[in-house]
Amino acid sequence: MKNNKLRNIANISGSLYNTIHGWLKYKYGHANKCESKKCNHESHNYNWCLIHSKEYDFKRSNFKMLCVSCHKLYDMTEEIRKKMSKINSGKNHPMYGVHRYGKDAPNYGKHHSEETKRKMSKNHVGTKDKKFSKETKRKMSIAHKKYWKNRKIQL
């Protein structure tokens, strides 16, 4: 009976999603762990996630708790990834044909203040002394050589 009242409220408000997620938080609290077996358990942000093949209903068994990254991976099936890739490729990409160099660059003609330069310098201290493995150095060398070989000079 209580679930029918909640469903009626959802129908009136027009948002079953918000009503059910509000019910989950009220009845079971905020999601506080990741129930994925593939998770590295380093996140602190968790969501209630609808289990595939289950329907939105007021049943705890239809949901599981996932961290944000596992939730995205769970929802993004290979089919959806392919569709999104196709939708956002070529002329459909929001940055297609946008030139952001020279006078069209957002920071063209602007200069950093001395304080900003000091902050940037402080943040970069120690980054030049990173120790890379020989394998990483070899890969970086190949990538740089490939870049400079294919680079087109614009005059």
Image (cartoon, rainbow, N blue to C red):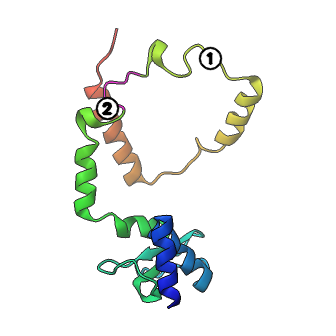
Identity of the residue drawn at 28% across and 20% down:
152
Residue 10 higher or lower than 125, as above or below = below
Q: Quadrant of the C terminus?
A: top left
- Is residue 97 within the magenta segment? yes
Q: Position of residue 115 (x, y in %)?
A: 77, 28
Residue 31 in sight from this viewpoint: no
Identify the element where label 1 is drawn. loop
Q: Which residue has dot 2 on it?
A: 147
Q: Position of residue 1 (x, y in %)?
A: 50, 91
Discs 1/2, front: 1
Please report whichever mark, 1 or 2, sits nearer to the chain's N-terminal start: 1
Q: Which numbered marker is on residue 42?
A: none
- Quarter residue 56 falls in: bottom left
Q: Residue 61 or 32: which is nearer the viewer?
A: 61
Q: Position of residue 101 (x, y in %)?
A: 44, 19
Residue 36 higher or lower than 77, as above or below = below
Q: Residue furthest top?
A: 155
Q: Residue 123 or 57: which is nearer the viewer?
A: 57
Q: Which residue has dot 1 on it?
A: 110
- Quarter residue 46 falls in: bottom right
Please report the bounds of the magenta region as a residue range.
95-99
| Amino acid of disc 2 | Tyr
| Amino acid of disc 1 | Lys
Identity of the residue drawn at 58% across and 68% down:
45
